[in-house]
Amino acid sequence: MNEISYLLFLSVLGVTFIASAAYLVFFFRQNKQVRTIARMILVASGILQTLYIASRYIQVGHTPITSQHEAVVFFAWATTWAYLSFRWRYSVKNFGTLVSVFICLLLLISTISSRELTPLSPALQSWWLPVHAGVSLVAYGFLSLAFCGGIMYLLQERELKSKRFGYFFSRFPSLDALDQLISHCLTAGFVFLTLGIVTGSLWARQAWGTYWHWDPKETWSLITWFIYLVQIHQRLTVGWRGKKGAVMAILGFAAVIFTLWGVTYLLGGVHSYAG
Amino acid sequence: MQGEKILLLGVNHKTTPVEIREKIALSDGYDEPLSALKKIPDCKECYLLSTCNRVELLMVVEDRAEVENDIITFLFGGSLSEEERSQYLYIYYNADAVHHLFMVAASLDSMVIGEAQILGQLKEAYGYAAQLGCTGPLLNKFLHKSFSVAKRVRTETGIGSSAVSISYAAVQLAEKIFGSLKGKKVMLIGAGEMAELAAEHLVGRGVGSVVVANRTLSRAVDLAKRFNGSAVSMDERVQQLERVDIIISSTGATDLVLRKQDVKSVMRTRRNKPLFFIDIAVPRDLDPKLIEIDNVYLYDIDDLSSVVEINKSARDKEAVKAARIVDEEALKFQRWCQGRAVTPTIRDLREKVDGITRLELDRTLARMPNVNGKDRKTLEKMVSAISSRILHDPLTYLKSESCTGRDNSDMKVDVIRSLFRLDNGDDDK
């Protein structure tokens, strides 16, 4: 089983790498055929990621989301499927390029931390685990899409404002399309993030007796949640759209990343992973 | 003929603020002012062009100082001081006038260089002048020449395509900002030709409604009707910003029409929805600082050209090429004008007839090898006698004083030149 799982992981890496390479070729050449191929490869990568996670599940006997490596792979998986589900509804020109590169980076990061299997501490053995951690990481998947959209928005906006129409101008989608994308991903991500926090707190009540006990991860999740809450609120009321919206999507994602890694390595707490 | 000159007076968007131009622009057709112009003493031929960017008066007059004053008074109707007049008005004579009119016709003097509408306006104005008998042999020739110069510039340079592609670029940029243009609203500030062209492109791409703001409301109403839009007064422009998405400004105002704080105050009510400004006026209508506001995009003509990759230098190159054509044609026309005088016509006529007789004599002599020197002299004498006797009557006709006392030598020159085809070869035959 271990070999199969390892082979699956290697193929995930390889296929995702090929997918982002194909997307990059499409980005530079703008050949539609290449895009179709790249899209198929990314779908293949998504399926392989699912299989890899399933194989880990069989190996460890619980949802593989507890070690650093597992969490990052799950993050990549959530981003991939968030993008694919999104892509299915409507298309945003050349968005796939940035997202596939981002997924590829996540998977590369996952190779850094140990793939070792870690037994689950009794406190974590509960069906709350897949619900709480899974939902939170799906939220991160959508929020990372908003982040990618924000970056594209800022690049395109800069070209439009500086009046030098270079490489990105023709290749990037319209500002309006990006703004809508950010808005949709934020909304979806925020809903999942809220669910993640609520389930976490219910689980904490069950496991430790209190809903909330100011663990660094909890605190930072709350901070992240507030950042997103404020920007969604402002977007709906006074119209924080466009550049401000893009900047906020990026800032919010920085908070997400800090909650995911910064807290684990710098602050510790009950959420620290065994790895 | 000697005391006659071509005179061109005018004001345009470069020299004169829109307020002054509006005062002298002719709102009610050409007929009245043209008949008035005809009555000015010593004015032999006249032509008048009035568009929203320029008023130009072209005349053939006797060389007399007072004529000029009469015309200036006619143009401004005494509404301006001496000083203001000299500040705004330009006056060109003969060669310079020719050059200027050719520049105008070739759309090199336009607000948007290369826009095609000016030629149509020139022709329309010519129609009125010709109908009223205001133009004579010289202006007829001159104006027709200016049309053909414009045509030549259009076919030989790429200057015309840049005007069209500029409005195409505006559409492209708008689509990069708004995605689809469906349901978006456009406001035209000032009702210039170029704005109209750009608006047409935008409407073609699905823009929902058009609002026209103009200083003279009647013109705004006319233009708005074309797009099924609405007209507003100039003072409402800032208020309108709350509702519209795309603004095309092309007034001839010397001052800024929209300032940064005007737009900034509106952004809050707009809830930061993007605003897209296009400034095609020279000098600029819109505060360049608008670009500093978030979600506001501002482009002028040069920016737009860079989108369609006709960069400024290429455009300038085409303009230089076009200017070269204009110079060349102006020079040719100048030569034609000089040829119209009596003396050169006599010379040309002599040369032509002498040339023919010499040619025929040489041919005949070549076929007669036995002719000696003395016979040859006799033959030559005979031929030259024939040619002078033939020329005698036309030359007398040319030199004759007219019986009515009116100098109609230009008419005679025309008759002789066309009878003997003295102008062949050097122009649009």
Image (spheres, coloured by chain):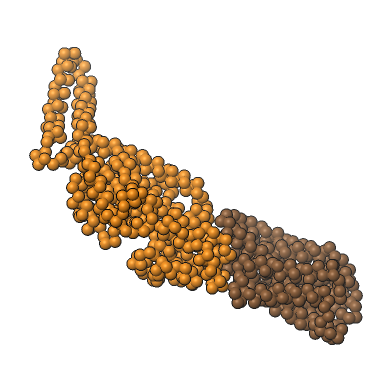
Residue B288, percent from left and from top: 52, 57
Q: Residue at point 18% right, 51% down?
A: B39
Chain letter, brown in picture: A
User: Looking at the picture, does residue B307 appear above or below residue B61?
Assistant: below
Relative depth, front residue between A214 and B19: B19
B202 on left or right of A148: left
Q: Residue at point 52% right, 55% down?
A: B303
Q: Could you say which quadrant of the image residue B271 lies in?
A: bottom right
Q: Residue at point 70% right, 79% down?
A: A191
Relative depth, front residue between B336 and B81: B81
Q: Residue farthest to the top?
A: B373
Residue B3, percent from left and from top: 21, 38
Q: In the rendered image, is residue A150 in sight?
A: yes
Q: Could you say which quadrant of the image residue B120 lies in?
A: bottom left
B303 on left or right of A222: left
Q: Residue at point 69% right, 76% down?
A: A229
Q: In the rendered image, is residue B147 in sight?
A: no
Q: Could you say which quadrant of the image residue B254 lies in?
A: bottom left
Q: Quadrant of the C terminus of chain B?
A: top left
State how many labels appear.
Answer: 0
User: Looking at the picture, does residue B64 appear above or below residue B227?
Assistant: above
Q: Residue farthest to the left?
A: B403
Chain letter, orange in picture: B
A118 on left or right of A197: right
Q: Quadrant of the N terminus of chain B?
A: top left
Relative depth, front residue between A240 and A36: A240
Relative depth, front residue between A213 and A271: A213
Residue B84, percent from left and from top: 34, 51
B268 on left or right of B374: right
